[in-house]
Image (spheres, grey):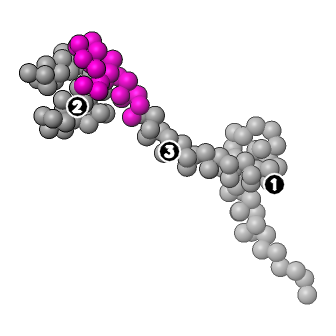
Amino acid sequence: MPKANNAVASKARRKRVLKKAKGFWGSRGNILTVVKHAVDKAEQYAYRDRRVKKRTFRSLWIMRINAAARLNGTTYSRMINAMLKKNVEIDRKALAEIAVKDPAAFTVIVKSLFE
């Protein structure tokens, strides 16, 4: 009896992996065994970096807030402390956005914290 190899599913599986490797350089994009490893690693990096992105953006917001705070005669640390004491609940993302887009409004916020 001939061996059944389910070629349709096998080809679909190979095609799916190769599709994920579109744009990969050299054998990482067209030799199946290498492609499998390359795609696995790419997915690991993608998973990790979706989490790292959150840290990176928080760090960026803090830098922007600190720069704007220093223009207003205080520091990020003192400003956040004052916000906690006065129960002002503006998140860092919004605060950074205000600092960049509307410096006058940011100045008003800083002044209100230290009155």
Q: Nearer the viewer, mark 2 or mark 3?
A: 2
Q: Is residue 97 magenta?
A: no
Mark 1 or 2, nearer chain start? 1
Q: In the rendering, which numbered label is found on residue 50? A: 3
Q: In the rendering, which numbered label is found on residue 81? A: 2
Which residue is at 62% across, 50% downward? 44
Q: In the rendering, which numbered label is found on residue 21? A: none
Is residue 101 in view? no
Q: Most extreme residue toward the left, as rendered?
A: 115
- Amino acid on which disc 2 is placed: Asn
Which residue is at 31% across, 33% downward? 93
- How far is disc 2 from disc 3 in space, using C-alphas? 29 Å
- Amino acid on which disc 3 is placed: Arg
Which residue is at 81% across, 54% downward? 33
Q: Which residues are magenta?
A: 58-78
Say if mark 2 contacts mark 3, CB within 8 Å.
Answer: no
> Which picture quadrant has residue 75?
top left
Residue assigned mark 1: 33
Task: Identify the image quadrant of the N terminus.
Answer: bottom right
Mark 1 or 3, nearer chain start? 1
Seen in the picture, residue 71 relative to 30 is either above or below; the reply is above
**Mark 2 element type:** helix
* Residue 16 placement (x, y as % from top left): 68, 57
* Residue 69 placement (x, y as % from top left): 27, 18
* Residue 52 placement (x, y as % from top left): 50, 41
**Mark 3 element type:** helix
